[in-house]
């Protein structure tokens, strides 16, 4: 039997399908259409909302492969891997893509070893090579300074993780048809050496890796009081808050908000960098954002090299003005 | 506790060059350091040994000069270093790298924990830790930000995820990959440096770990780099100077307009 079809690994939390799944459908649909095959969304969980399953089809899946079990409620590497392996052996997909999320970046390498597949991390561009039908996987490497295109000539399936926010979620199409296939995990070893004791949510709800907008501040703010302006601006813009390592080291903001080489990589639609010099390690985490705005009083700051719009000036003058201006707009809109 | 810390030697600067023909990195003339993110793993391992006793082994696969990374790890306080070096390992992707590391770990004897860095700053995949676990059939927990306590046959750790953290009990032996928050790496001591200089660092080859040659290096790697290119810098920065009140107002107004046009407000 040949390897065929494109799979996306959909993600659910608490029975609700996550946005990353819809972004993956955009990618998967493109690939399936180019390759001329079926697009399948594989979803593991427990008691997933029916409406969310239908939505996967409305947004581009031809088939939803659903495996539900108590043991699959939360992600744990071994049972998730075992179930995926069983499904891969049964259906033999040619391509599997997952989000470069805490789940995808853990499960995919754990799984790839078991099915002898090649795996490329953190892709930003996926395409099909016309002559061979191979998946072309392009990812930023060495701090985003270069793009490397990788392929897996022999091994199947071809696996890749894709950066969250690097594409738009697929649009819903009314009346789109597809099938929902319920598969059983019976006979699969669902035991795990990992037990979830509890989950502790972030104090602030917005998380930077999959935020559509990020407002980030750096050393230029000088004090933690001044840094509060970043939060205020972010709130007005409905953005998540990020920080440079300097800001994190000074405890103006916590580590989960750090953007860059030793922090998180973000690919939002908008990234506003304020009082951040744009050290190569910081750029590594944000230069693939769609639109970048920089505010810095040093006209030579590196951050301007990657910005679409820059203001050269004192952030203490500019940020309060911007905040005031946005508040005005908000009032006017009411 | 017996702990193994796989560490990678990476080029120091961000100004690494690529060989456009072969698609591999040009490492000559660039200073090599321990992958900065591996230092947090080394520190955690040393702290755990100080608390519970045992032994910390640093393990690295790389060219002969990767020995210096292992000596640095020993200067920090690791008990021993093992270098995996063989022409057959060259050109390995994460699959072949983790196969090689896992096979070598199998030769190291009993252990409780393997601690990897979250990712290497050059390859930047973060795949090797979970892949080692997969080869060895061990549980894995990634993005560990805190080691809470050692329990009966398990460790309690915090795992950073997108919207918070999970508190997990992970059965031993297991693989952890750690983020920066997990520890504050110490500097090497003078005594440590002396000890490191005097220590033997065994070099293991494909034959000495009994690896399957088909699974090593470029040959054993399912993936191939086919093209290296510079990202298109299509950004044209509109720069506005804001040196006084009037120009600041103007710049803010222009920014709001810019964002509005792109539907970003
Ligand atoms: C291995 C390694 C990993 C690293 N990982 C990361 C990482 O993940 N993330 C990260 O961010 N960094 C990282 N760094 C650190 C990085 O090299 C920089 O030191 C850091 O990004 C600098 O932060 P900053 O831009 O906030 O501070 P600075 O470099 O001090 O820049 C502050 C900027 O603010 C501007 N400024 C000052 N006052 C004002 C004002 N009143 N108005 C407007 N502008 C003003 C200045 O002109 C300057 O450009 C890493 C370094 C190493 C070696
Ligand atoms: N060649 C290597 N030798 C030893 N450890 C490695 C090697 N490559 C990767 N690792 C380990 O795996 C982690 C993740 O690396 P990577 O998957 O390449 O981003 C690193 O932080 C190291 O702990």
Image: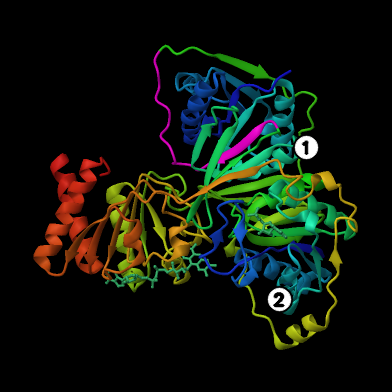
The answer to whether one can see residue A101 in this image is no
Question: Which residue is pictured at 59% across the width and 70% down the height?
Answer: B30
In the rendered view, how is the structure colored? rainbow
- Density class for disc 1 (Cα within 10 Å; few <14, some 14-19, many ≥20) is some
- Furthest-front residue in this view: B21
**In the visual, does B41 lie left or right of A127?**
right
Give the SS element for disc 1.
loop
**In the visual, does B217 lie left or right of B186?**
right
Where does label 2 land, which residue? B72
Where does label 1 land, which residue? A191
The location of residue B155, given as percent across then percent down, is: 74, 56
The location of residue A5, given as percent across then percent down, is: 61, 22
Q: Quadrant of the C terminus of chain B?
A: top left
Give the SS element for disc 2.
helix
Question: What's the mark number on residue B196?
Answer: none
The location of residue B106, given as percent across then percent down, is: 87, 54
């Amino acid at each position: 039997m040949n390897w065929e079809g494109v799979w996306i690994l959909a993600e659910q939390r608490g029975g609700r399908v996550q946005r990353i799944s819809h972004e993956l459908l955009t990618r998967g649909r493109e690939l399936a259409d180019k390759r001329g095959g079926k697009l399948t969304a594989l979803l593991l969980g427990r008691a997933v909302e029916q409406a969310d399953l239908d939505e996967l089809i409305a947004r581009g899946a031809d088939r939803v492969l659903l495996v539900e079990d108590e043991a699959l409620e939360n992600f744990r590497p071994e049972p998730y891997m075992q179930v995926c392996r069983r499904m891969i052996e049964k259906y033999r997909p040619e391509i599997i893509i997952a989000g470069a999320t805490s789940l995808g970046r853990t499960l995919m390498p754990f799984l790839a070893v078991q099915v002898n597949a090649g795996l490329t991390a953190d892709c930003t561009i996926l395409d099909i090579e016309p002559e061979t039908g191979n998946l072309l996987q392009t990812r930023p490497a060495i701090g985003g300074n270069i793009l490397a295109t990788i392929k897996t000539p022999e091994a199947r399936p071809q696996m890749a993780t894709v950066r969250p926010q690097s594409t738009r979620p697929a649009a819903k199409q009314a009346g789109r048809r597809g099938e929902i296939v319920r598969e059983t995990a019976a006979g699969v070893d669902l035991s795990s050496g990992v037990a979830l004791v509890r989950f502790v949510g972030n104090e602030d709800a917005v998380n930077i890796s999959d935020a559509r907008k990020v407002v980030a501040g750096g050393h230029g703010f000088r004090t933690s009081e001044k840094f509060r302006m970043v939060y205020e601006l972010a709130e007005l813009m409905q953005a998540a808050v990020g920080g440079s390592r300097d800001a994190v080291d000074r405890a103006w903001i916590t580590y989960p908000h750090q953007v860059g080489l030793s922090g998180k990589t973000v690919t939002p639609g908008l990234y506003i960098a304020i009082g951040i010099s744009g050290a190569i390690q910081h750029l590594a985490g944000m230069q693939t954002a769609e639109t970048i705005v920089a505010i810095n009083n040093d006209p030579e700051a590196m951050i301007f090299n990657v910005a679409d719009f820059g203001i050269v000036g004192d952030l203490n003058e500019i940020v309060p003005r911007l905040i005031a201006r946005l508040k005005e707009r908000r009032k006017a809109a009411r | 506790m017996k702990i193994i810390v796989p560490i990678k030697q990476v080029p120091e600067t961000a100004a690494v060059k690529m060989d456009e023909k072969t698609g591999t990195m040009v490492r000559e003339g660039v200073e090599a350091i321990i992958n900065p993110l591996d230092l947090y793993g080394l520190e955690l391992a040393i702290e755990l040994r100080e608390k519970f006793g045992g032994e910390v082994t640093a393990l690295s696969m790389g060219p002969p000069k990767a020995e210096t990374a292992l000596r640095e790890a020993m200067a920090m306080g690791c008990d021993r270093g093992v270098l995996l070096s063989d022409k057959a390992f060259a050109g390995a992707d994460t699959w072949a790298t983790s196969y090689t590391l896992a096979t070598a770990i199998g030769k190291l004897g009993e252990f409780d924990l393997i601690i990897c860095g979250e990712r290497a700053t050059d390859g930047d995949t973060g795949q090797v830790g979970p892949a080692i676990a997969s080869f060895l059939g061990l549980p894995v927990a990634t993005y560990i930000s805190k080691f809470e306590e050692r329990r009966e046959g398990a460790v309690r750790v915090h795992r950073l995820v997108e919207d918070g953290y999970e508190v997990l009990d992970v059965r031993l032996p297991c693989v952890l990959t750690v983020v920066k928050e997990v520890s504050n790496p110490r500097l090497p001591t003078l005594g440590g440096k002396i000890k490191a200089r005097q220590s033997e660092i065994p070099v293991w080859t494909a034959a000495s770990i009994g690896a399957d040659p088909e699974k090593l290096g470029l040959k054993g790697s399912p993936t191939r780099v086919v093209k290296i290119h510079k990202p298109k810098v299509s950004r044209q920065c509109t720069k506005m100077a804001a040196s006084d009140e009037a120009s600041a107002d103007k710049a803010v107004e222009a920014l709001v307009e810019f964002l509005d046009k792109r539907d970003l407000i």
